[in-house]
Image (cartoon, helix red, strand yellow):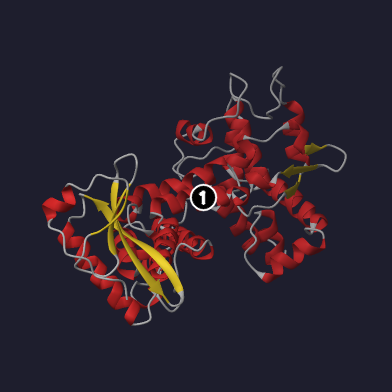
């Protein structure tokens, strides 16, 4: 046990300016270290186990004499209980460093997850929609929260206000919340269950989206009126009208047609191959072209410097409203996307083609039969026959005009 010197007063300690160690008494081993620079700090010299340790207690005068003695007594009590104060302090510092390194807000986690998922996005629009939906609905509620602290109640704060009114958007937000929290867990920023998981979790506290709101259907033209409409459409002038006609003949989506390029056309095989980034299902789609579709393409004039099949006046792709504007000029109250429904109705009610053939024509990958068809040869021969029959059906009425739809 170190010798206990006479206790110095606060005034006496203040006057200690000579470099070296000065015992101040009150607690065995408590000393004031004075450096040549004049800086002063408290040291407790003690034996921990079999090792002699100098344990820092803080700088002087930030830590006064009375406080230094209290800290020294606490250290000695810990040593008597078999605790190494130095090792304990190092462990605590390491825990703090680890905890700090693991701190990440939900907003930062979402952006880092979004960056990691870049190769998965089908196109630029999908990439922007993914993060913008979280910025709009999640960031205002939980963006500043530590991702490790997010629980079910926080997820409900985001979803409940939009679950009934914007069900489709809400379901996508939920999926993205789940992805961010899963990324955070795998990356070591949180532990435990994912509070944005649907099965066995949110499913028990939120209505099933499929039963909450009827599925939206686009306004479609009846099968009976299609050929008369097509006859009238062929009389319309302009690139947008031709693009709409081509979209109907191929049962394609507007965006697939508007951004189609000449190098996607195989004149020998009479097919149009749409790259994966323009297909909703995320995989390349080959479209057999009927005679009418090929005739339409061959009649188009190419614009120098533009590879788009249906270019705008400036050479870029047509706008997303261009095909809709054709229908408005014709005073036809249907949606461009609705012609895909007309095609499906025709295939189901007017033909004997198996359902997976029309599903493949629509680039739907939604069931085992469709996936099996993709694995074979996309049923191109059957689909070529179907598109030929569809084209012929579109020509049944050549000279009639749609009076009312």
Q: Residue at x 46, y 56 (%)?
A: 217
**SS assignment at label 1:** helix
Identify the residue under disc 1. Answer: 114
142 w.r.t. 127: above or below: below
Question: Along the line of sight, which residue is nearer the eye, 173 or 115?
Answer: 115
Q: Residues within 10 Å of mark 1 (few under 14, many from 20)?
A: many
Percent position of residue 175, x then y:
47, 61
Residue located farthest toward the bottom when viewing the structure as drawn: 81
Q: Quadrant of the N terminus?
A: bottom left
The image shows residue 153, relative to residue 126, as above or below, that is below
User: In this orientation, which residue lies closer to the viewer: 87 or 104?
Assistant: 87
Residue 351, quarter of the rendered image: bottom right
Q: Is residue 391 visible?
A: yes
Q: In the rendered view, would you say 359 is above or below 299?
A: below
Residue drawn at the location 70% of the way across and 18% of the way down? 305
How many numbered circles are shown?
A: 1
- Indicate left or right for 49 with 222 as reference: left
Picture quadrant where residue 235 is located = top right
Judged from this view, the residue extending furthest toward the right is 268
> Which residue is at the front of the view, 348 or 303?
303
Residue, x 53% and y 61% (percent of image)? Answer: 187
Residue 395: x and y, percent? Answer: 68, 43
Going 24% across and 71% down the picture, which residue do you hit? 73
Q: Position of residue 240 (x, y in %)?
A: 58, 30
Residue 164 seen anywhere in this rendered image of the structure:
no
Asked whether, in this view, residue 303 is left or right of residue 45, the answer is: right
- Residue 323 falls left or right of residue 277: left
Q: Position of residue 154 (x, y in %)?
A: 31, 64
């Amino acid at each position: 046990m170190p010798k206990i010197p006479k206790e110095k007063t606060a005034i006496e300690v203040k006057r200690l300016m000579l470099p070296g160690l000065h015992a101040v008494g009150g607690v065995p081993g408590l000393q004031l270290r004075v450096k040549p620079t004049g800086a002063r700090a408290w040291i407790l010299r003690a034996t921990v186990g079999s090792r002699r340790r100098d344990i820092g207690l803080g700088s002087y005068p930030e830590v006064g004499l009375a406080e230094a003695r209290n800290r020294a007594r606490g250290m000695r009590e810990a040593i008597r209980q078999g605790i190494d104060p130095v090792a304990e302090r190092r462990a605590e510092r390491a825990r703090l460093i680890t905890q700090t390194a693991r701190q990440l807000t939900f907003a930062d986690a979402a952006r880092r997850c979004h960056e990691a998922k870049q190769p998965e996005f089908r196109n630029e629009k999908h990439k922007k929609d993914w993060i913008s939906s979280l910025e709009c609905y999640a960031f205002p509620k939980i963006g500043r929260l530590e991702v490790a602290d997010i629980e079910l109640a926080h997820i409900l704060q985001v979803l409940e206000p939009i679950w009934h009114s914007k069900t489709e958007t809400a379901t996508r937000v939920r999926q993205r919340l789940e992805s961010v929290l899963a990324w955070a867990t795998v990356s070591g920023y949180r532990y435990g269950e994912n509070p944005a998981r649907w099965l066995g979790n949110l499913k028990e506290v939120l209505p099933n989206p499929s039963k909450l709101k009827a599925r939206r259907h686009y306004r479609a033209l009846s099968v009976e009126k299609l050929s008369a409409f097509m006859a009238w459409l062929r009389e319309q002038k302009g690139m947008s009208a031709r693009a709409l006609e081509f979209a109907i003949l191929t049962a394609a989506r507007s965006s697939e047609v508007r951004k189609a390029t000449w190098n996607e056309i195989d004149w020998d095989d009479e097919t149009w191959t749409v790259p994966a980034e323009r297909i909703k299902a995320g995989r390349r789609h080959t479209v057999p072209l009927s005679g009418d579709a090929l005739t339409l393409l061959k009649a188009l004039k190419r614009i120098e410097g533009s590879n788009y099949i249906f270019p705008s006046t400036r050479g870029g792709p047509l706008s997303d409203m261009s095909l809709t504007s054709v229908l408005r000029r014709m005073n036809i109250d249907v949606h461009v996307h609705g012609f895909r429904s007309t095609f499906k109705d025709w295939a189901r009610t007017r033909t004997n083609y198996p359902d997976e053939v029309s599903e493949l024509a629509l680039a739907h990958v939604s069931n085992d039969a469709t996936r099996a068809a993709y694995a074979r040869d996309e049923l191109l021969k059957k689909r070529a026959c179907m598109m030929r029959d569809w084209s012929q059906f579109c020509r049944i009425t050549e000279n009639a005009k749609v009076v009312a739809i």
